[in-house]
Structures are given as C-alpha cells and as structure tokens.
Amino acid sequence: MSTAALPGGDRSILERSPFARLPDRALKYGLTALAALILALIVYFFVRLFAESEPAFAHQGVFGFIFGNDWDVSGEKFGALPLVVGTLITSGLALLIGVPVAVATALYANELCPLRLRPALTVLVELLAAVPSVVYGLWGIFFLAPKLQGAEQWVADRLSFIPFIGGGAVTIPNYFIAGLILAIMILPIVSAISREVMATVPSDQKEAALGLGATRWEMIRTAVLPYCRAGIVGGAMLGLGRAIGETIAVTIVIGDAPQLGKHLFGQGYSLAAVIANEFGEAQGLHRSALFAAGLVLFVLTLLVNALARVLVSRASRVRGRSSTVSAASQPPSIAGAAAGA
Amino acid sequence: MNAHGAGGASPALARFAVSRARRRRDRLARGLITAGTAIALIPLGLVVYYLLHKGLGAWSASFFTTDPTGNTFFKTSSIGGVKSAILGTVEIVALASAIAIPIGIGVAVWLVEYGRDSAFAHVVRFFVDVLTGVPSIVFGLFIYIVLIVGTGSSYAGYKGSFALSLLMLPVVIRSAEVILMLIPGALRESALALGAPRWKVIARVVLPTALPGMVTGVLLAIARASGETAPLLFTAATTRNTDFNLSHFMNSLPVQIYNDVTSPTTAVVNRAWGAALALVTMILLLNLIARLVSRRSRLA
Amino acid sequence: MTKNRIGALASVALLALGLAACGSSSSSSSSSTSAAGSTSSSSGSATVSGAGSTFAAPVYEQWASAQSGLTVNYQAVGSGAGITSLESKTVDFGASDPPLKPADEEAIAKNGSPAVQIPMFLGAITVSYNLPGVPAGLKLDAKTISDIYLGTVKTWNDAEIKALNPGSSLPSTAITVIHRSDSSGTTAGFTGFLTAADPEFKSKVGEGKDVQWPTGTGAKGNAGVAGAVQQTAGAIGYVEQAYALQHKFTYAAVKNKAGKFVSPTLASTTAAAEGLKVPANLGIKISNPSGAGAYPITSQTFIVVNKDLCKAGVPGGEAAAKGVVKFVTYGLNEGQPILSQADYASLPAAILTKSKEAAKTLECNGSPIGG
C-alpha cells in the first residue's frame, strides 16, 4: 500500500496506521506458538510413554518385544508380534472394506442423490459415528458374528486353496469380524470428509467435463476424483488411525488369542485390545509392557502415515504436480484456465 | 449433454454419440456407487434396530430423572436411571470440546495459512496424523500417569475431559485442514487485494467459508469423544450421584454402559442398552441442531 | 449472518463451560457430596473413593447405596489397578481378590503405615456348560476339567466324563472350550484350582490371571463367557457364581479333595473356607479345601487399606478415613445378609470375627476409629 502523498497533502486512503500490523503479527505468532505447543505436547506424550515402557524394553530388548512371537504374561515373556500382525490385519481389512464404501457413499450423496434426500443421507451416515464403540462390540459379538459364521465357513471351505483365507475352523470372534466392525466404524469419518471435499469441486470443472461429452461416471473420474484425491487420502488416514487405535470394540470381537494369525476366520489379538484387557490387573513389568505396546502403536501409525505420504506425493509427482500440499492449496489448472478465458 | 442418446441424431453427430461400452461402464459405475451406499446403510439399520429393540424398553420418565442407585439385588427397590451419566457426559464432553475445538482450528489455520510447505509445518502435520492412531485407552493412561499418579491426586471429571480433548484434537485439526486447503487461493487474494489485513481475511473470509465443512469435522470429533469409554475409566472414574463439579468424580454414559452391561442382573443390563440408545439419540440431536445453526453454503 | 452463526455456536460453548465451571455440587438424590480432594469436612457427609476388584463390585455398590451421609464411589478397574491406586494414594481404599504380594505390602506401607487386608466375602467359580438334554449337576473332577481345557478330552461322551457319570447319557457333541480373554481374578482362581490338582496342567499352562490357553475361544468378561456358552451348544466355560446363579445356568458338580461331588451353592462355598489356616496378615487363599461339603473352586476378596489411614494421607482426608471404616464395618455386620440375596457367599464365622477385629484396629493419626 503506497504511502506516497497525494496531491493536496492528504494521506493515501490505502495507508494504514503502524498499529494496523499488530493484530496480524499477534495472530501469526500466536498461532505459531500454538502449533509449537501442540507439537511439544505430542513429543512429551511420546517421551512419557517411552519412559513408562522402559522396563519392558530393558527386559526383552526392543526387537525382542516387537518381533518376539510369544505373549506370555505369567511367564513374563512379552513378544508382541502376534499383536502387531493382528493390528495390521484388522486395520488393513477395515481400510479395504471401509474406504471404497465410504467414497461410494460420498459420491452418491454428492453426484447421484436426488437433492431432497441429500441431508437425510448425510445425517444417516454420520449417525454411524454416534454409536459408542462398546455398542459396536456387543452388537458384533452377539448379533453379527453368529449370523455370519455360516457364510464364513462356506467361504473358508470353498476358498481353502488360498493360504490365509481357507482351511481351519471358523471361530465366532475372528479377524474378519473385527475388520468388518472397524470398517463400519471408520465409514462415517472417511465418508464425511470425502463428501465435504467433493462438495468443493468447482462446478465449472464438472460442467466443462459434461459439456465435452463425458458420461456421469467419466465426469466423476476426470473432474471430481483427481481434485479430491488429497482430501480423500486425508480422510482415509483419519479412518486408518481410528482403525489402528480402536480398543473396546475390537477387544470384544477378536477373540483375544495371542497367536500369530494364520487364518482370516480365526481368533486374533491386537495391540489396543491387549492394553484394554490386561491393564486393570497388570503390575510392574506387565504394566510397562502394555505401555510399550501403546508405544509400538504410536510408531506403527507413524510408519503407515509416512508410507502413505510417500505414495501420495509420488503419485502426484507422476501426474505433474509438485506436491499434495501446494497442489491442493491452489486452484487446479483447468478451473484457472476456464476462469481466465 | 446433447451428445447423449444419439439414437436418432444426424449421422454428422453420430461420432459424438456415447458408445455402448461407455454407457455400460457409466451404468455399472453408477450401480456400484449406489450399491456401496446401500451397503453402508445396512449396518446402520441393523445396529439402530438392535439398539431400539434392546434399549427402548428401559426408557421411562424415571430413567432420565433419577440417578443410578447401585441397588441391584433387592427385588423390590429400583435400580435407578441414568441422570448423572447423561449430565456427566454433557459436561465432560463440553469441556473437552471447549479445549479441543479452538486449539484444533487454530492449529489448522496455522498449517494452511502460515506454515504451508515449511519443514516445521510438515513435522507438525505428520505428528498430528500419528496422534490419530493412538488408542483411546492410551490417552487415558497418559493422563492417568501424568495427572493422577504423577501428582498424587485423585480422579476428576476434568482429567477425563483432558484425555478426551487429546482424542479429539487430531480429528479436528486434520479435518479442518483438509477443508481449509480447498478454499481457492483466489478468494484470499481478492480479499487481500481489497486491502484487508491478514487476520481479517482469515476471520471474515476463510473461516466463514470453511465453516460448514469444519462443523462436520467437529461433530465427528464430538460424536467420537462422547462414545469413548477407555479414556474415562482411569481418569474421571465414576460416581452415582449427580455432581456438577468437574474436579470430583463424574459419571458418564459410556462408563455407565460399560459397567452395567457386564452385570449379572438383567434389569441393569437393560438399563445399559437404554443408556446406549440415549447416547446415540443425544448425538443425533446435536448433529441436527448444529446443522440447523450453520446453514449450508457451498463454495462455488 | 456470519456473526450470528459464530455467536450462536459461541454462546452454546460458553453455556456449556459455565455449566461446567460453576462448580458447587448439587445433588438431587439422597446422599450429598463434598470436595474429594480437600481436608476434613464437617460431620454428616463424606465422600470415600475406592478401586479394585470387579468381582466384588456389585456388592460394594449395593452396600454403598445403603449408606446415609456417606457417598462411596467405587471403580471396578481390576484388582491390580486397585492396589496400584492405593499405593499412589489415588483412592481411599483398594479391593483385591488375591491376597497381597509382599512387594505390594511394602509399597503400600511406604505411604507411612502398614497395609491391612480384610477378607470380606467369598465367591465360587462355576463350571457352566450348554448341553441340551443334560441337566445341571454333571459330575466332573479336576483331572477331567483340566483335560478338557488342555484339549485332550474333545467330546462330551469321552470315556473320562462317562466314567464319572455312569448313569447319564451323554451326546457325542464336540466340546467348545470357552475361557476369559482379559486378565482376571476369576481366571486366577480357576487355574489355581486346576494347577493344584493336576501336575500336567501346572506344567503346560500354569496359574495366573492371564495364561496361555492351549485350546478354546476367548471371551471378554464374565458376561462374554456366559454369552458364548449360551450361544454354542456343547460349550463349557468358567463363570462367576453370582452370574451363573442369577441366570440359572447349568453347571457341574465338582469333586473336592474329600472325594465328594459338590455343586456350587452358597453353603458349599462358605464351607470351603472352614478350617482354613489364617496367616497373621489375614491373607487367606483358598486352595483345594478339604471339607466334605466344600466346593473346591472358591475364591476370596479383600478390602485393603493402610492401618493408619490419616497418617498415610488418604485423598479424602480424615472424613474419608472415618467413612472407610464405617463402610467396612457395615459390610462385615449389617451388610452380610445382603450377600445371600446377591448370590455371594459369606465367610465362615471364625474368619469373619478376625475381619471385624482387624477393622477395629484401623486408626486415624494414632487413635482408633472403629467401633
């Protein structure tokens, strides 16, 4: 803003008083301090967890803890591999089942749904988020699991040639049910965020695609989905986080058997579940082993997130954009060109 | 859209017609999307039916207006309702939201407006993402270690709120950030070009535009926090009486449900299901009210 | 318009905060509460906090509801967490099913006063099963139960079971073994019984709150095991007595040391502690009782406090110290008849007397509270 004096000696109307900068500066430094504070809190959280889990790592060794295949409380052996594998299996299942369905729901709500039904559909999907986790667990074990047992047995028998799916007896609580319940639980998060993201697609982009002769699906595929990719991945990451960390519901439906999961329809265990199950009665070394399990979860989420970031940024680079962050914060080129034309 | 349905169009336009393969793919995709939505709604219907079936019977006037009595064995006296649990949940979640929402939105604003692509912002973003994966019980245990065992003090409602706000924070930050990032830069630039200072652009242009989307994220975080048991078990503990003081033990619906559902007495188990139904209804009402308050306004 | 929206949300938030902050306690039910963390309050109302055993929770809740002028807040977080809470002075009293380990006694004593554990009541662990056509009272002994849980006995009409039940017709259904998935004193009691009676079980599985089961499905909590047993024909699971009695499960009659097959009734549970040798610190542990009418899978539960509660610095202060003693004394006297209504078993008279004496020794800063 020019401070050059105008003819006549008046100050430029664009000029601002020296104090005008103050709120801006205050906001900037205030928010930066806030972000730093949150980061410090997370780091402290990590450090404290580590401090509490120290005895277990000293006893077992870090690699012994993570890759040891034996969780034996009374024998004071704490090998968490079955738990880590169980967490990965159930979260993977949850993503595999949950994200496509969630994105489909968001697409339907935004593109295909009749306008009058849209708010109802939105509320219904978010209602899934309102159900407490303990209710999901109980509904899973008392209603869903017994009902699906027959179908699971059929699948296990028919597909017995596939190593992980087939063969072996189907127990009522098993990995599959846990993954399914988790998928239902992450559905509202992924769907709601995807929906919000899809709603921000500029309609001129969509109309341009349709105007060029695209079918509805082609329009979605070329104009909506690429624009929303970063946002959908963000939503999926939140969903994954929920799936990895879900405690109570998984505890109830997974069977809680600390054996390495060889079998989709067999019992398993997860890191979060073991903490919930054993903390009440744990003392001393056992307790610190449970904190160590929490720490492993923390690190697991870290690794998965890092991996997701690498994959997404690599995909964006291939498509000719610099990075997901800057790409998403700028209007995409088509809309820019359309606006400028 | 005039190129579709090319059946009777002139031969000149025929080459713009939608091929059968494309039309089939379109119909298939649409069918899959609709099917996916139906699949999403089936468990909802089943769960709601299950809840209603098991919980509605427990609802009565006294269910909402009396505290649980702990009296479970005398056949003649009442087991009480869940009043203290409902009020407790409202208070604990309200405090947790009051902490998590402003801080969360603040951090999200910083990430999008100021931090952007800097290394520091990447680090913050990364660690916030990581925080989403921590199990709810670990938040409770963290607060337990730091605020209860560490200070040698007892359980309190506000400590439960702290644990819940830790749970809500990453959800609020991440979802707000996603929405804020999608606001076109052109909007900000035009406001700046008109001479508005940075803070006004954020407060008057960016945030209001993002509000409907952020409300969704916030509601999801609140819904999650309201239904979590594990963080409260070792922090807020539980009590039977209605007590508005957050520095005392405080009852809450998830903990009440968790404790009741394992009771040997059938009437108590029924009360647990009634409480679960009440919790879901409360969150649904909150959802509806919040949507009414922030009427939808789309960007484009 | 923007201002209205933000204003509306802000006012809702402020209202909620205000509700939360304006802290004077107000209660519309009978007992009144007072600040939990402060020092002694006026006479008439006090708040006591306790944590521990989930097994004993329903009884403590019941006793708490009968108190007037005293609010007892009990957290059923598990015996282990209860003792830890007492050690860190988070609560006024702890509750544990197993007797205190020496390490725990030391840790509690560090607070300034030795630990006192008071046996309160007993409970049995039933071996419940779901076998249509076979009524309650199927005769089983420790070896057979152990073999079932080790997986060597796989069907209900196995020779071992038949040998004990010559008169009954047993189906060839496969046995579905259900065990607890969470750490629990019930598992400790059950495995303790099997370990004492069967060396093979001792070497293969051992005793503990949380063991490696060679076979079977895990279910969470008593309710989980009970539900799983009810859902599956041919299932067998170990379920707390109160649960089994209230829901009228079919359970086995287990052979005790004297050679008799006893059903888990309240009387047979109390009989299990008859003639039990009581150590000086009252840390009784029922293991393979020798009485003729004793049900062999029985466990006890304690309330654990510091001897001088005030000196040890209980969070509730002097008022809470007095409240704890009032609560414990109530439980040992007027609270006893409630036990049978709740399907829990009372201690035999000899041990109950010792508990009452122990409660009388509790003091506050040197002067005894009890009475």
Image (spheres, coloured by chain):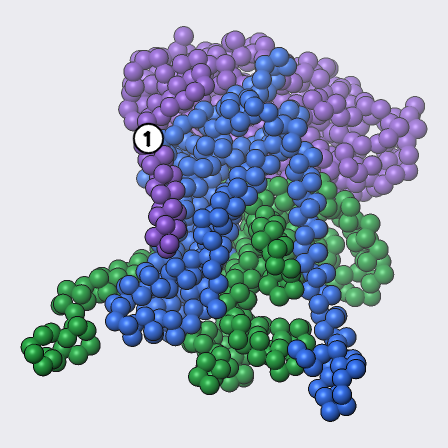
Chain colours: A green, B blue, C purple
Front residue of A105/C105: it is: A105
**B61 vs A206: above or below:** above
Quadrant where the N terminus of chain A sits is bottom left
**B51 vs C114: above or below:** below
User: Residue, x 82% and y 63% (percent of image)?
Assistant: A159
Q: Position of residue A321 (x, y in %)?
A: 48, 82
Q: Is residue A287 visible?
A: no
Please give the chain letter of the residue carrying mark 1.
Answer: C
Q: To which residue does mark 1 refer?
A: C23
The picture quadrant where one finds residue A233 is bottom right
The picture quadrant where one finds residue A142 is top right
Q: Is residue C221 visible?
A: yes
User: Residue, x 83% and y 36% (percent of image)?
Assistant: C234
Front residue of A50/C41: it is: C41
Q: Position of residue C85 (x, y in %)?
A: 43, 34
The answer to whether residue B228 is left or right of residue A164 is: left
User: Residue, x 9% and y 74% (percent of image)?
Assistant: A10
**Residue type, mark 1 in image:** Gly
User: Residue, x 70% and y 45% (percent of image)?
Assistant: B46
